Amino acid sequence: MVRVKICGVRNESDLRTVESAGADAVGVIADVPVDTPREVSLGRASELLDAAPPFLTTALVTMPDGVAEAVDAAERVAPDVLQLHGDFAPEELATIRADVAADLVAVVDAADPERAWSVAPAVDAVLVDSVDESGAGGTGETHDWAATAEVAATLDAPVILAGGLTPENVAEAAGVVEPYAVDVASGVERTGGRKDRDAVRAFVANALGAGGDTDADEETSGGGEETSDADEDANAPVEEVSS
Ligand SMILES: O=C(O)c1ccccc1NCC(=O)[C@H](O)[C@H](O)COP(=O)(O)O
């Protein structure tokens, strides 16, 4: 069964939305050199990931300048997973992996599958994404899933599929690529980087191929179950959601 990571959470309310939707992992984005509504400080990333429950895997998504900065970020935030964007050489990734307590995920450009093979031995998983020219994610753009399926089928490391996934296309994408996990940021948002509760729940349910069988689906389709306080917070008008 495919795992699901929801990325770019900026507040506790959205964290609870991700948890209650049944996602496997949550990502916070810090220390990236691009303008994104999803970025928080390293201190805030640490607070948010500390607030995650025991069985929700936490990921720090960052784009540091070099090895020392990557290790420092991981030490400050103490995530379960360190997801690195940027053009790190395999040797640098191996050094970072040896120096941090977290599992290491390297992000590769879907247009450059050769890089997936070169970095795979140095990391715990490879995230194939539709990155921009600087290597940053969150582009909301899909890529050639058939090409990524070849990478996933032949790479000796788990492959995480990202890039333009939405509640509407995630089941098809997961069916084509058969990744270890799927990852989404912009495809489950309202404005300003805030998560849309219904979209998060639909994304998780559709990724898992659960159809209408889950509590999350019943609630999404007005199934009548009570929502938690956290759910209510997630549905509050944008200006009432703390960040
Ligand atoms: O999401 C961002 O704004 C971002 C900025 C800089 C580096 C990484 C970023 N996101 C990393 C992720 O893991 C996203 O979930 C992934 O790129 C997919 O994004 P999307 O296409 O918006 O679903």
Image: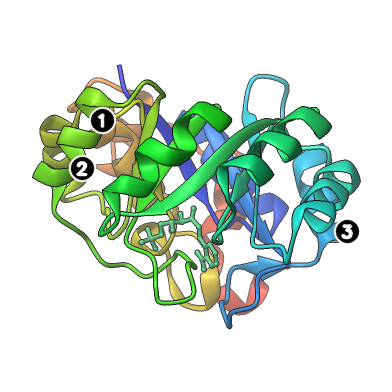
Residue 235, label in figure: none
Tell me the tag on residue 148.
2
In contact (CB < 8 Å): disc 1 and disc 2: yes
Mark 3: amino acid: Gly
Image-based side of 142 in relation to 200, left or right: left
Question: Which residue corresponds to mark 1?
Answer: 152
For residue 153, what is the image quadrant? top left
Which quarter of the rendering shows the N terminus? top left
Q: Quadrant of residue 223?
A: top left
The amino acid on which the numbered mark 1 sits, given as a three-letter code, is: Ala
Say which of 32 and 182 sits in front: 32
Q: Nearer the viewer, residue 61 or 38?
A: 61
Q: Where does residue 56 sit, x and y in percent of width and height?
A: 62, 27
Q: Nearer the viewer, mark 1 or mark 3?
A: 1
Q: Tell me the element at label 2.
A: helix
Crowding at label 3, few (<14), some or many (≥20) Cα neighbours within 10 Å? few
Q: Which numbered disc, 2 or 3, marks the residue that appears first in the sequence? A: 3
Q: State the residue at coordinates (17%, 35%).
A: 149
Residue at the image point whose x is 41% and y is 51% from the top: 108
Disc on res. 43: 3
Mark nearer the N terminus (1 vs 3): 3
C-alpha separation, residue under disc 1 versus residue under disc 3:
34 Å
Residue 217 locus on image (x, y percent): 29, 33
Q: Position of residue 232 (x, y in %)?
A: 57, 51
